[in-house]
Image (cartoon, rainbow, N blue to C red):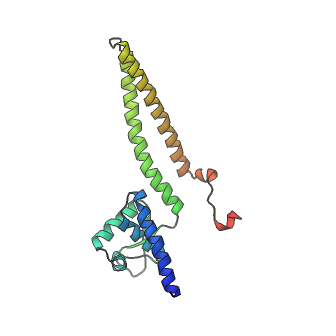
């Protein structure tokens, strides 16, 4: 096996690992292969170039690159004299993870917080209602405790997302590179 074949084999192994794990981002294996191919390509690529390299349809490439772009994993690039859209992998994987984590969790936090806040208000009104029997009052009081626990969890999760977005997470879990491991 010559050097070029070894290089291609190593790259293919990494591209397949990305394809297998891209589901963590809610994407398909083909989007993972597209991302992996773009990762190893030193220049931005057009959809036509991606189609040629991967043997997938241009429509599929377009859909995948849009999904990768929405997750801030790839970005449009500009190159003098090229009229077609170019795309490249964003260089900062740490920030890409933070963006993805924040986008997904902020949406979940908001949805749950609104539901918990509204439900707590209604349950507190219900527990004050003197016409309900003691058995129902006990159930409502336990539900209030459960929802207060949920509220506390989502408030903590909101602070955690803040720690990611403010990069305070790196104080707790520093980025290690070869130069600072020694």
From the top left corner, tell me how far across and down residue 15 is, in percent: 44, 71
Q: Residue 42, can we see it?
A: no
Question: Is residue 15 positioned above or below 111 on the image?
Answer: below
Residue at x 39% of width, y 63% of height: 68
From the top left corner, tell me how far across and down residue 46 is, in percent: 37, 76
Question: Is residue 20 positioned above or below 134 on the image?
Answer: below
Residue at x 56% of width, y 48% of height: 163
When asked about the image quadrant of residue 120, the answer is top left
Drawn side of residue 17 relative to residue 55, left or right: right
When asked about the image quadrant of residue 180, the answer is bottom right
Which of the pair 35/19 is nearer the observer? 19
The residue positioned farthest toward the right in the image shown: 182
Residue at x 28% of width, y 74% of height: 57
From the top left corner, tell me how far across and down residue 32 is, in percent: 40, 66
Q: Quadrant of the C terminus?
A: bottom right
Residue at x 40% of width, y 59% of height: 23
Q: Residue 37, can we see it?
A: yes
Question: Is residue 138 positioned above or below 74 on the image?
Answer: above
How many callouts does the rendering have?
A: 0
From the top left corner, tell me how far across and down residue 110 is, in percent: 41, 41
The residue positioned farthest toward the bottom in the image shown: 2
Drawn side of residue 152 relative to residue 87, left or right: right
Which of the pair 59/46 is nearer the observer? 59
């Amino acid at each position: 096996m010559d050097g070029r074949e070894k290089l291609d084999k190593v790259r293919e192994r990494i591209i397949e690992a990305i394809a297998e794990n891209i589901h963590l981002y809610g994407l398909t294996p083909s989007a993972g292969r597209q991302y992996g191919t773009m990762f190893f390509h030193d220049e931005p690529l057009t959809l036509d170039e991606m189609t040629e390299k991967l043997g997938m349809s241009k429509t599929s490439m377009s859909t995948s690159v849009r999904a990768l772009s929405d997750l801030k994993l790839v970005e449009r690039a500009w190159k003098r004299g090229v009229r077609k859209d170019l795309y490249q992998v964003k260089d900062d994987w740490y920030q890409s993870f933070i963006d993805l984590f924040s986008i997904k969790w902020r949406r979940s936090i908001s949805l749950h917080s609104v539901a918990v806040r509204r439900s707590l208000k209604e349950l507190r009104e219900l527990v004050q209602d003197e016409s309900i029997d003691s058995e129902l009052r006990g159930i409502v009081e336990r539900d209030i405790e459960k929802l207060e626990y949920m509220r506390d969890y989502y408030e903590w999760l909101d602070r955690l997302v803040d720690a990611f977005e403010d990069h305070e997470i790196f104080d707790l879990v520093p980025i290690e590179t070869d130069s600072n491991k020694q």
